[in-house]
Image: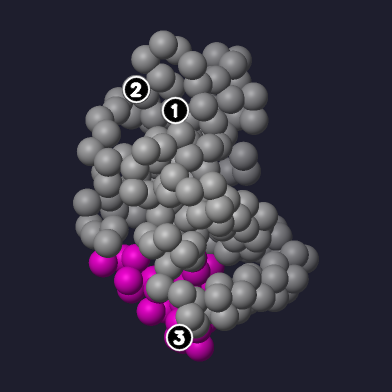
Amino acid sequence: MRLYDYAGSQNAWKVRQLCAHLNIEYETVWLSIFEGESHTPDFMLKNPAGAVPVLELEDGRCLAESHAILLYLAQGSKYLPDDAWQKAKVSQWLFFETDYVQSTIACLRHWNLTGKNDRNAAQLSQRRASAKHVLGLLDAHLQDHMFLANGGYSIADIAVYAYVHLAHEAGLEMASYSALNTWINRVSAIVGPDVPVRYYREDPFCGRDL
C-alpha cells in the first residue's frame, strides 16, 4: 500500500496512527501540497478533491478522505465495532469531526500556525466562537463517557483527538474543559509517542494558500 501524505496534515496523522495500532506497513509518498503537488493531473485521478491523505492499494484502487480510510482499515479490528448500532455511533463522531472540528479548530490552527490570521481577520471572531461551542459540546458529552462511542476507544477517538488535542495551537483556551482534558490525556496515553505530530514549519511553502 501507498499513503499519499503531507507531514503537517493531522488528517493524514489519523491514518498514520491507526496503521501504527494495527501494525500495517505502507510506503509513504510525500507531497508538497502548497506547491501544488496534490493538484497535478495524475494525483487528481487518485483524488479529484486534490487533497491528502489518499490510500492506494496494491491493485491500484485509491481511497481518499481520512475517515473513509479509517473505516476501511479498521474493519475487523477492535477499533471499529461489529455491532451495527455501535458502528453507527462511531460514524456519528466521524461525521461530527468533519462537520464541526474541521471548520473551526482545524481551520483556526492552520491559519495560526502558517501566519494567515491577518488575511482571514474578518472570519476569526465567528470561527473562534464556533470552536468554543464545539469544545463545549465535546466536554459535555465526555462528562459521563470515557470515550466518544460506547464501545470503548475507537477510530472516532483517533479522528476527533487529532485536532482537538492541539486546540491550544489554534489560540483557544482549554483550561475550563475538564472532562475534555481528561479524555485528551486518556487518549494520549493510548496513542503514545510513536506517531508524532509534525508541523507546518517543516515546509517553507506553508504560507501559501492551497
Asked which secondary structure carries label 3, the reply is helix
Q: Read off the residue under disc 2.
A: 1
Between 22 and 43, the one nearer to me in the picture = 22
Give the x, y percent position of residue 198.
35, 51
Q: Read off the residue under disc 3.
A: 178
Separation of marks 1 and 2 at Cα, in angstroms: 7 Å
Q: Residues within 10 Å of mark 1 (few under 14, many from 20)?
A: many
Magenta residue span: 161-189
- Which residue type carries mark 3? Ser
Point 33% across, 73% down: residue: 185
Give the mark, 3 or 2, whose residue is nearer the N terminus. 2
Asked which secondary structure carries label 1, the reply is strand
Look at the image and tell me whether residue 33 can be seen.
no
Q: Are marks 3 and 2 in contact (CB under 8 Å)?
A: no
- Which residue type carries mark 1? Leu
Q: Read off the residue under disc 1.
A: 55
Q: Which mark is residue 177?
A: none
State yes or no: residue 175 in magenta. yes
Would you say the magenta stretch is mainly helix, strand or loop? helix
Q: Are marks 1 and 2 in contact (CB under 8 Å)?
A: yes
Give the x, y percent position of residue 163.
48, 60
Left or right of residue 59: residue 41? right
Give the x, y percent position of residue 200.
43, 50
Point 64% across, 30% down: residue: 49
Between 63 and 129, the one nearer to me in the picture = 63
Q: Quadrant of residue 41?
A: top right
Separation of marks 3 and 2 at Cα, in angstroms: 40 Å
When the figure is inspected, residue 30 is found, relative to residue 123, above or below; the finding is above
Asked which secondary structure carries label 2, the reply is loop
